[in-house]
Image (cartoon, rainbow, N blue to C red):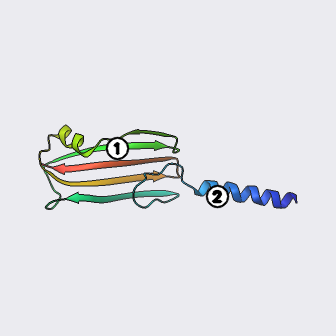
Amino acid sequence: MGKLKNLMVLLAFTAALCISCATPGFGPNGSLFSSTKTGLSGNGDGRGSKTSEGCAHSILGLIGVGGKDVTSLAEDAGIKTIKGVSVHTFSVLGLYANLCTVVVGD
C-alpha cells in the first residue's frame, strides 16, 4: 500500500508541474516555453512610422500587472492612423508570462 501511495503522490506532483500557472492567456501555450506573435488587425501592409507597445505580466498566475488598451498606446506614440495591431506572448515554465500589444501606424 505504501508504494501505491508514493506512486499517486508522484503522479499528482508530475501533473501539477505540467500545468502552467502563469500563461499569457492568448494563442498557443507551451507548458515549458512559448513565444508567439499574432496579428490581430490591420489595414494596408501593417507598416508605419510609429510603434507603441504595452505589456501585461503574470507571475505564477498569482500576480498580474501592466497593460494598455490600443487607443492609449496610439495616443502615447502620437499615432493618428492605426495600420496594424499585434500581440506578442511569452511564457516560461508557468512561472512567468507576458502579453504585449503592439500598435503600428502614422
Q: Considering only order in the chain, which callout, 2 or 1, is on the residue closer to the N terminus?
A: 2
| Residue 82 left/right relative to 24 | left
Q: How many marks?
A: 2
Residue 41: mark: none
Q: Position of residue 36 (x, y in %)?
A: 37, 58
Question: Which residue is at 52% across, 58% downward?
Answer: 31
Q: Position of residue 68 (x, y in %)?
A: 30, 41
Which element carries disc 2, helix, strand or loop? helix
Name the image quarter holding the N terminus: bottom right
> Badge 1, how many Cα within 10 Å: few under 14, some, many 20+?
some
Residue type at numbered disc 1: Cys
> Badge 2, how many Cα within 10 Å: few under 14, some, many 20+?
few
Residue 15: mark: 2
Q: Position of residue 76 (x, y in %)?
A: 20, 38
Which element carries disc 1, helix, strand or loop? strand
Q: Position of residue 16 (x, y in %)?
A: 63, 54
Question: Which residue is at 51% across, 45% downward?
Answer: 61
Quickly name the residue at label 1. Answer: 55
Residue type at numbered disc 2: Ala
Relative to residue 50, is residue 1 depicted above or below? below
Question: Which residue is at 76% across, 59% downward?
Answer: 8
Residue ranking furthest to the right: 1
Question: Which residue is at 86% across, 57% downward?
Answer: 2
Relative to residue 76, is residue 99 depicted above or below? below
Relative to residue 65, is residue 86 depicted above or below? below
Relative to residue 12, is residue 60 depicted above or below? above
